[in-house]
Image (cartoon, grey):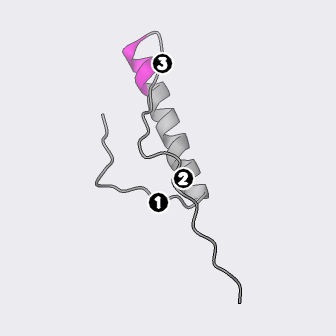
Amino acid sequence: TAKLEEPPAPIADDSLITGYGNTDEEAERDHDEKLLALLGRCGQVMLRLSIKKLQFK
């Protein structure tokens, strides 16, 4: 019989996304672009996020 492998352990529990720019609007736009990119990547690799733990601006 084949031995089942253990699932991989999480490598990060918390993430902080920051935005940079010369104005608040630029920084917010940069932040939002990075957030959307992260959420898109999570979807690609089927990484589930807990909506209860998400904190938005």
Left or right: 20 in relation to 44? left
Q: Mark 1 points at which residue?
A: 48
Q: Does the magenta stretch include residue 13?
A: no
- Per the rendered image, the range of residues in magenta is 23-28
Q: Distance between the residues labelled 2 and 3?
A: 22 Å
Q: Do the residues labelled 2 and 1 touch (CB within 8 Å)?
A: yes
Left or right: 56 in relation to 4? left
For mark 3, give the secondary structure: loop
Q: Name the residue under label 2.
A: 42
Disc nearer the start of the sequence (2/3):
3
Label 3 environment density (alpha carbons within 10 Å; few <14, some 14–19, many ≥20): few
Q: Name the residue under label 3.
A: 20
The residue drawn where x is 40% and y is 19% is 25
Left or right: 44 in relation to 21? right
Q: Distance between the residues labelled 3 and 1?
A: 27 Å
Disc 3 marks which amino acid? Tyr
For mark 1, give the secondary structure: loop
Q: Position of residue 54 (x, y in %)?
A: 33, 47
The residue drawn where x is 42% and y is 34% is 16
Q: Height in image: 33 above or below 42? A: above
Instruction: Name which quarter of the figure residue 31 lies in.
Output: top left
Q: Where is residue 15 in the image (x, y as percent from the top left)?
A: 44, 39
Disc 2 marks which amino acid? Cys
Q: Position of residue 51 (x, y in %)?
A: 33, 55
